[in-house]
Amino acid sequence: MHRMRHFILLATTLCISMLLAQPDASAEGISAGNGSVIVDGQSFSSWSDYYGSAYFAQSGRRCGTISGRSRGARAVSPSDCTYSLTNPTADYAASVVYEIPVVVHIIEHSNGDGQISDALVQSQIDVLNEDFMALAGTPGQFGANVAVHFSLATLDPSNNPTTGITRTVNDQWHNDNGNYWDTLAWDTNRYMNVYTNTASGNLGYVPDLPQGGLAGSNWDRVVIAWAAFGRNAPGGPPFDQGRTLTHEVGHYLGLEHTFLGGCSGDPTPPGCYASGDLICDTAAEKNSASGCPVGQSSCNTPDPTDNYMDYSDDTCMDRFTTDQLRRMRCSLLNYRPNLFSAGATLTTTTTSTTTTTLPSYCAASPASGCKTAAANRAQIKIDDKTGATKDKLQWKWKKGQATLNSEFLDPTLGAGASQICLYDSSANPQPLWQAAAFAGGTCGSGPCWKASGSKGFKYKDRDATPEGITSIKLRSGSDGKAQVQVKGKGTNLALPALPVTLPVTVQYIIDDGVSSTCWQTIYSQAAKNDASSFKAKGP
């Protein structure tokens, strides 16, 4: 799943160094018009034809990122995550969500190649979050939760509103030639810069790991082949589900390929933290994987073909490991300290059937100063059914205090999150239950959030991912007119164990990291409160 540009092409190698020279045009992926592609002088009818060819499989261009150790250390590195060592201490555990703003630079050819819609860009951001947040109900749910969340930038370097997407038509740059980054880059200390072009015939690449000292330079970037970008990417299977960017961002955050060093590394700690891919909980692997070879064993242990840092097909990849997450967070803290902001903390929530680690968007105690609804006009209903697929939650807050449309912080713009938090009066860790719906995003074939004229916003996600919320309705208005409604269902809800201990406080909070607004109800009595259901009206 790796993608990098070839400055010097060695057709038999797995990765080509980006650091040695300006690329030879004959060694690159070139859009030749009419959808055709030329790579190393060989012609292919389309990018899909090229990706499916024996030549692509043998050329090692799944990724163009070269191992940091092949370059030699060029900078004094913090000792816990260097070019040659990982020390995955608890200091780098996923305790807080790191929020990273992204700018996507789309570089098109004058013949039309490279055109990517805003919706496809957002789908790619969604895939990143599914994989790095291990979101329930997504292919990434079985991996380690790296607790890194990505959003398209909403402000450019000059503090002007932006979609986080730029578009440029330049044939040379589209074919990955020229120092386009010197013209297009946004402050790489503050934004993750992603470029889409031909990626020199690779699926993608980064010029170097952050340990090499490139962080903060215009050269610091992630390059993805436009035909392999986004969910249901234009190039088609098997590299069309957005995992190319997941893989390359792994490099951007300091990870090596799982197959680095083959079977020669030390298989046990601490030696495995200083050999191979510098990770102990990924098994050694003789060569990169191709296709989806489940059960393959090349070094006497099952190969990590499901790992994002291998070369498997997109649909075969579904996880990072705990050691990988700690190396990435170490890389952020030590090499990219200005790139991220600290967001939600993580807590462990126990439900009636499972114990799940969830992002703790809600504080440990209820917020103050929240808007309230008219008497008996706020209702909550929780049904914990046998078989979690039938679980349901509904909260209606009606005839509430005056709410301006601006207080909803326009979730269509892609900043912040809507959070629903439930606190009871027991001694259990609080909040007792929580869920969130991030601003922006794609649900099905369209945007999750839509404006309701100038009176509010609606959220709809039939798949109930990532945390079970299926719909949200926000309506602004004067006193007695404002409304907030939240519905959820299914296994992703992770409902709290019932019955709850009264009084119960339910809050709906919108927070973009700069400002926030809160709506709440306190329930002192319940119409029903047993092991299967909680129903109440308030305040």
Image (cartoon, rainbow, N blue to C red):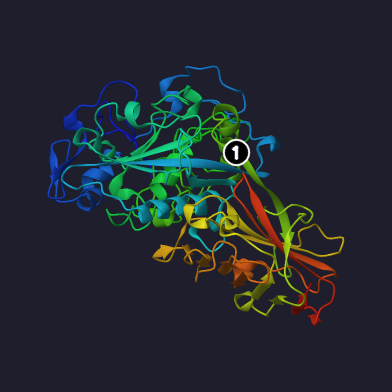
- Residue located 50% across and 68% down the image: 461
Quadrant of the frame with the N terminus: top left
> Would you name the residue on which mark 1 appears?
341
Residue 431 falls left or right of residue 512: right
Residue 479: image x %, image y %? 68, 68
Residue 373 falls left or right of residue 157: right
Indicate the secondary structure of the residue bearing disc 1. strand
Residue 139 falls left or right of residue 218: right
Quadrant of the frame with the C terminus: bottom right
Residue 139 falls left or right of residue 519: left
Residue 209 is at least partly visible in this image = yes
Foreground residue among 502 and 410: 410
Residue 64: image x %, image y %? 34, 35
Above or below, 503 against 258 in this view is below
Residue 230: image x %, image y %? 37, 52
Residue 187: image x %, image y %? 45, 30
Residue 424 found in image quarter: bottom right
- At label 1, the amino acid type is Ser
Foreground residue among 454 and 268: 454
Residue 425 found in image quarter: bottom right
Above or below, 35 against 208 in this view is below
